[in-house]
């Protein structure tokens, strides 16, 4: 049974939508997702998404991963949705797992399956989750869910097949290509955010990560936080959308599901680390910026609060600590 | 279950198909027995509307009021390059519509391109209804070139609505051809569809899997490359040659130009079968002080023709190579090549195709009919739950936003399987910016086309780059694009569903629907009158032929004389009713005439 523990102490203020606030009020550490859904009068799937956001914000944490949940009680049967009951349950369950599973798991094939196996699995499973199978039927919220599942399966299939292709290239040409990753270091189990799996996306992403890391380590001081040049001219930040379950989550808190090969688990852990770092960097930047704003406005108390949060995120950064000290001095004087 | 018709609305010819009671796809022939109908609409001097073969036949003498290749204009803006070039080459008049769209002038009346297409669709619907009398055939799947953009698809859908059709889906022509090719066969294959039609070129690469899955891997094309362009090469060659010889430009005479165009098309078709074709157009133009008549007489051989259009073929091949690259496949991965479109009958096209894919193309499908058949199959698959067929198509154009500095930022790439969605985070470009404008763009070749726009307001005033806005694009299974923007900080949201950019407002479409329906009722009345009239005239002729013989046999009796007098009366009345076009009266008298004829026949055949 998935239990959601109490609110974590000492979390920063975070803008929540009304339903999220309502949900947060209901979280008491004993209720599971389905029960919460029932209490809030919402679809379990929607509650799952909101919880994911709360987890990402670091407001709540899961005691146990929600994967091993009992079949949810869907309160909305008899709502005129023209889908068989079993299929709806299947869609609900799969939809919730979507963000957590890698491509191999989604398609139900062994890790490192061949191109042919992946293709066959996709052709077996994919069409079941295509909305055309239920053409001009009343699907309600299921239309979106089915489409999301289909899109995820398609992305998984495309990524894995191109991975298998690349891996194949590497084995046949042992040292010909330096740019192709070795078969063991493939890490695109997560569908790339742009929708088109390509090497560039991965490379761009890692390049951006490196640039960010460098920027943070060499930051001369928060008051003159340098802007990323590339962000200035091209407006999109192109941060990959963090997967829903991320942030402060410790991947080791997840139970080891049997049947997941260890390399898949490693990839998952890598993914969590990367996403965690990204989120931390983003939050740090946000705190430093709002602190700077507050300093300019003369609102020292807010600035101190923000710097405290920032230094918590980057405890080894001496500059941040210095700024924090200066702000609290100013606040004391005021 | 209600049947669905599949309509291939082509640039030069259209075709309609249906799945019969035995589950076999059938192409429905028109009244003339032809399986395809020219996509030509004309209005005669008397205001009569003509569609199909009959419109084509009168096109030379009425070229200013005959619309052909309307598909090249559908969904396009008045000031776009294709419309500008069409304005110079077509014989009918193109004017600017109220929304910067295109209107076609026929006998002082302006029609939108959608209405012209609707007339063709109505005709195809009529063709189908004549083969399935008494059955309403309102649902249709219509095909479009794979490379059509959102506006062109929407305009085609609108044309369907105007024609009174419930367009359940718009599908891509090469995909439809693949459905027709693989329907009912269990296979596991990668195929390429090479579709060179009257006006457009498409190439699609598909995977066909067990269980009836048709997955498009990549698609590429050119909406301005087709049979028409091959014709124009011959037209130019003929006209330039004529000018060199006689110093007269035939382009200045619309009727002459139309005759040359027809002759060029004929020569092109002949050259697919024979090595040399003659173009013989006597009295093409009168010229000079004594109005001397000039004749156009030339012969063109296959090699000359192939040289004339070598660059067109090269363009096709480049597109094929691009599609294979997009699919990350090589020629050796393609296991079958399906040829679609009349132009693929040209030997040079077949040769070019087998060169690029390194295999002989499949001859198993009929190039003019497969697309309509595929559309009918898709219609059945959507509505019939027993049908185990699923089509996974891709979006032919990339979708994204326009960001600061007119930079196109792609969210959904070309050749992404639909339905799909993608999310990306953006930020503000100026300090204290409290609103952002989201410009939803579609990238077509190197041009970006605006699909829709909206504002997300109420952002916190902050330095540039601090506010994060999450934008989500999604395309659902009907191809409808939705865009959703969210301010990550406040949770403020704004979204749009990108709909009709076909250039017509909803009211206009409703208005056009009404007038199209009125026309149809009138026309059906006309058809009925015509049928009844012909039947009555046949009866009259037969009775009059037998009359002298019967008179000789029965005139001796009173009863006989009375019957003959009555017959004369009815004949006179019927002729009168025919002259006055009185439907009910003709019908009534026809019954009497039928009885009379039966009696006459009885009298004549009685042994004496």
Image (cartoon, rainbow, N blue to C red):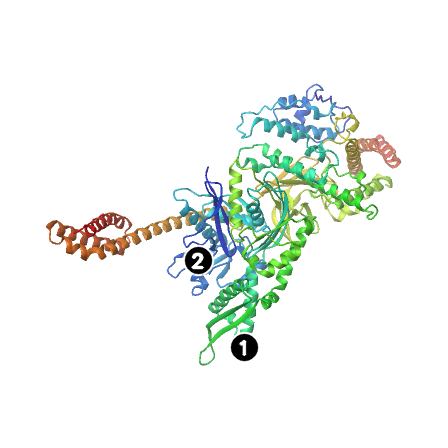
Name the subunit of mark 1. Answer: B
Q: Is tag 2's residue or tag 1's residue first in the polypeptide sequence?
A: 2
Residue lying at the far bottom in this picture: please name it. B290
- Answer with the quarter of the image where residue B351 lies: bottom right
Residue displayed at 14% across by 52% down: B554
Q: Is residue B121 left or right of residue B591?
A: right
Q: Please tell me if label 2 and label 1 are on a single chain.
A: yes
Q: Position of residue A264 (x, y in %)?
A: 77, 33
Q: Which mark is residue B329?
A: none
- Name the residue beneath numbered marker 2: B53
The residue carrying pointer 1 sits among few (fewer than 14), some (14 to 19) or many (20 or more) residues within 10 Å by Cα, namely: few
Q: How many marks?
A: 2
Quarter of the image for residue A56 reads top right
The reply to whether residue A192 is in sight is no
- Residue that label 1 marks: B245
x and y percent of residue A297 in the render? 78, 37
| B298 vs A76: above or below | below
Chain letter of disc 2 in the image: B
Q: Left or right: where does residue B135 sit relative to residue A35?
A: left
Give the image location of residue A122, x and y in percent.
66, 37
Is the residue marked by circle 2 packed among few (<14), some (14-19), or many (20+) residues within 10 Å? some
């Amino acid at each position: 049974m998935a239990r959601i523990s109490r609110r974590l102490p000492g979390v920063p203020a975070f803008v929540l939508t009304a339903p999220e606030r309502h949900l947060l009020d209901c979280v008491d550490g004993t209720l599971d997702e389905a029960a919460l859904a029932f209490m809030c009068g919402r679809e379990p799937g929607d509650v799952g998404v909101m919880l994911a956001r709360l987890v990402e914000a670091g407001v709540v944490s899961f005691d146990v991963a929600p994967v091993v949940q009992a079949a949810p009680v869907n309160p909305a049967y008899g709502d005129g949705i023209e889908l068989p009951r079993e299929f709806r349950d299947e869609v609900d369950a799969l939809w919730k797992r979507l963000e957590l599973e890698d491509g191999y798991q989604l398609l139900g094939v062994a890790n490192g399956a061949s191109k042919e196996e992946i293709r066959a699995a996709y052709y077996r499973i994919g069409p079941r989750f295509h909305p055309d199978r239920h053409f001009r039927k009343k699907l309600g919220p299921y239309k979106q869910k089915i489409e999301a599942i289909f899109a995820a399966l398609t992305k998984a299939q495309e990524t894995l097949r191109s991975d298998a292709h690349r891996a194949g290239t590497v084995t046949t040409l042992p040292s010909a290509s330096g740019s192709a990753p070795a078969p063991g270091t493939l890490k695109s189990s997560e569908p790339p955010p742009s929708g088109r799996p390509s090497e560039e996306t991965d490379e761009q992403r890692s390049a951006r990560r490196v640039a960010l890391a460098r920027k943070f380590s060499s930051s001369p001081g928060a008051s003159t936080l340098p802007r990323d040049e590339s962000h200035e001219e091209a407006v999109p930040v192109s941060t990959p959308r963090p997967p829903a379950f991320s942030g402060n989550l410790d991947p080791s808190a997840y139970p080891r599901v049997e049947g997941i090969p260890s390399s898949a688990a490693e990839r998952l852990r890598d993914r969590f680390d990367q996403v965690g770092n990204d989120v931390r960097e983003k939050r740090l930047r946000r705190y430093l910026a709002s602190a700077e704003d507050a300093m300019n406005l003369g609102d020292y108390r807010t600035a101190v609060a923000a710097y405290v949060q920032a230094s918590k995120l980057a405890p080894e950064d001496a500059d941040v600590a210095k700024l924090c000290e200066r702000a609290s001095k100013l606040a004391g004087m005021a | 279950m209600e049947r669905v018709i599949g309509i291939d609305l082509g640039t030069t010819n259209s075709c309609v198909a249906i799945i019969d009671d035995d589950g076999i796809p059938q192409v429905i022939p028109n009244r003339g027995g032809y399986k395809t109908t020219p996509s030509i609409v004309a209005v005669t001097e008397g205001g009569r509307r003509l569609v199909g073969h009959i419109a084509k036949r009168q096109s030379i003498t009425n070229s200013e009021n005959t619309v052909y290749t309307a598909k090249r204009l559908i969904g396009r803006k008045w000031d776009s390059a294709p419309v500008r070039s069409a304005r110079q080459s077509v014989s009918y008049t193109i004017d600017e519509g109220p929304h910067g769209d295109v209107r076609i002038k026929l006998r002082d009346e302006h029609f939108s391109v959608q209405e012209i297409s609707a007339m063709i669709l109505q005709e195809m619907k009529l063709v189908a209804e004549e083969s399935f009398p008494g059955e309403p055939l309102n649902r249709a799947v219509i095909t479009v070139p794979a490379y059509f953009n959102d506006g062109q698809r929407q305009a085609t859908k609108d044309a369907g609505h105007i024609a009174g059709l419930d367009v359940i889906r718009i599908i891509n022509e090469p995909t439809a051809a693949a459905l027709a090719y693989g329907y009912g066969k269990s296979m596991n294959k990668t195929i390429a569809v090479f579709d060179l039609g009257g006006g457009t070129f498409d190439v699609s690469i598909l995977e066909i899997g067990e269980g009836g899955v048709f997955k498009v891997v990549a698609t590429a094309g050119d909406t301005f490359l087709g049979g028409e362009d091959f014709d124009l090469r011959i037209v130019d060659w003929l006209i330039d040659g004529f000018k060199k010889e006689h110093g007269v430009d035939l382009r200045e005479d619309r009727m002459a130009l139309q005759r040359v165009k027809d002759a060029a098309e004929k020569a092109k078709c002949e050259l697919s079968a024979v090595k040399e074709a003659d173009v013989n157009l006597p009295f093409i133009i009168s010229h000079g002080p004594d109005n001397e008549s000039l004749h156009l007489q030339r012969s063109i051989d296959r090699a000359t023709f192939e040289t004339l259009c070598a660059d067109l073929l090269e363009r096709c091949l480049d597109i094929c190579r691009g599609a294979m690259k997009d699919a990350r496949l090589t020629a050796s991965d393609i296991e079958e090549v399906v040829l679609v479109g009349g132009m693929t009958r040209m030997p040079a096209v077949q040769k070019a195709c087998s060169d690029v894919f390194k295999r002989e193309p499949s001859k198993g499908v009929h190039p003019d009919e497969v697309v309509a058949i595929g559309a009918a199959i898709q219609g059945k698959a959507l509505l019939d739950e027993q049908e185990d067929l699923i089509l996974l198509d891709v979006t032919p154009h990339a979708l994204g936003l326009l960001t600061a500095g007119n930079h196109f930022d792609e969210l959904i790439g070309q050749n992404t399987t639909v339905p799909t969605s993608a999310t990306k985070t953006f930020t503000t470009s100026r300090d204290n910016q409290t609103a952002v404008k989201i410009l939803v763009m579609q990238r077509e070749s190197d041009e970006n086309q605006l699909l829709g726009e909206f504002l997300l307001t109420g952002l916190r005033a902050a330095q540039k780059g601090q506010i994060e806005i999450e934008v989500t694009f999604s395309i659902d299974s009907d191809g409808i694009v939705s865009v959703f923007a969210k301010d990550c900080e406040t949770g403020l949201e704004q979204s749009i569903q990108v709909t009709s950019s076909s250039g017509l407002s909803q009211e206009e479409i409703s208005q056009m629907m009404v007038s199209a329906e009125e026309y149809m009722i009138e026309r059906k009345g006309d058809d009925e009158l015509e049928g009844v009239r012909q039947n009555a005239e046949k009866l009259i002729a037969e009775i009059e032929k037998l009359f002298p013989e019967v008179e000789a046999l029965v005139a001796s009796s009173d009863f006989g004389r009375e019957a003959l007098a009555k017959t004369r009366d009815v004949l006179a009345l019927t002729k009168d009713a025919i002259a006055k076009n009185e439907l009910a009266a003709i019908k009534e008298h026809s019954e009497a005439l039928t009885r009379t004829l039966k009696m006459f026949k009885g009298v004549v055949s009685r042994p004496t």
